[in-house]
Image (cartoon, grey):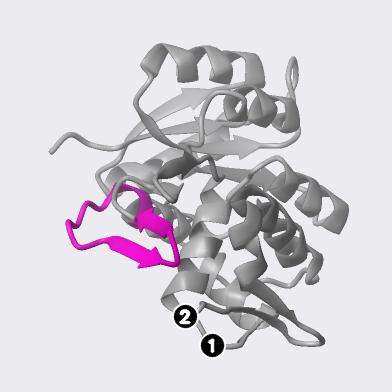
Amino acid sequence: MDKLKILVVDDESRMRKLVKDFLVKQNYEVLEAGDGMEAVDIFFEQQDISLVILDVMMPKMDGWQTCREIRSYSKVPIIMLTARGDEKDELQGFELGVDEYISKPFSPKILVARVEAILRRTSRITPEDILRVNGIEINKAAHQVSIDGVEVELSYKEFELLTYFVENKGIALSREKILNNVWNYDYFGDARTIDTHVKKLRSKLGEKGNMIKTIWGMGYKLETEG
């Protein structure tokens, strides 16, 4: 099997080397870019990049704009790196479709663990990975969702959130539990991250979005029609 390609984008060559060394040890192929413009060029030249690790503060084109450029064409998983722990930055990142958000300084081992967790979910192909409930069909291997046979475009996190709801249908899920399972790590922000994603998910699901019930003061539950 070919190695999965990861694009590491950071204007600090030392940071790129640190991340690259850890990823290469785990048998990934790593491409590097020193700014956002170079990153976008490489991304569209390569076509088969499995994940992007993207610094926020960069010359020529910052991480936010780079993310917008990539997101306008691709749902490839994106991990953002930033020197600032500002909650507004984090919420902006999730609004743009960022999948994980890591503040510097960070442990390279933790970064690699998050990369592996995302790639396991997006690259693994298992034939029985089809979930169905009330006209919603989730193909976990192909990362596709359809409603009554019509495909619905979801972001990576919206897909993960819907999958988690369906796998736990009928169960009341606290926001903390959803964050720890869907975001795959202990999250110290506030509940707006989840609420924003649920709102978007409901909208994209149309009438089926009404199946996601709010449990006031706690979280959410996917209720099926029997």
Query: At 61% across and 31% down in the image, what residue appears?
Result: 10
Q: Is residue 105 visible?
A: no
Q: Quadrant of the N terminus?
A: top left
Query: Is 125 one of the magenta-colored residues?
Result: yes
**SS at mark 1 in the image:** loop
Amino acid type for the residue under numbered disc 1: Ile
Residue at position x 25%, y 53% in the image:
124
Marks 1/2 in contact by CB < 8 Å: the verdict is: yes
Residue 195 lies in the magenta-colored region: no
Residue 14 coordinates in the image, percent (x, y): 56, 35
The residue beneath circle 1 is 171
Can you identify the residue that label 2 sits on? 168
Lateral position of residue 50 relative to residue 212, left or right: left
Per the rendered image, the range of residues in magenta is 121-139
Distance from disc 1 to disc 2, alpha carbons, whole Å, reads 6 Å
Q: Amino acid at mark 2?
A: Asn
- Give residue 47's position: percent from left, percent from top: 38, 20
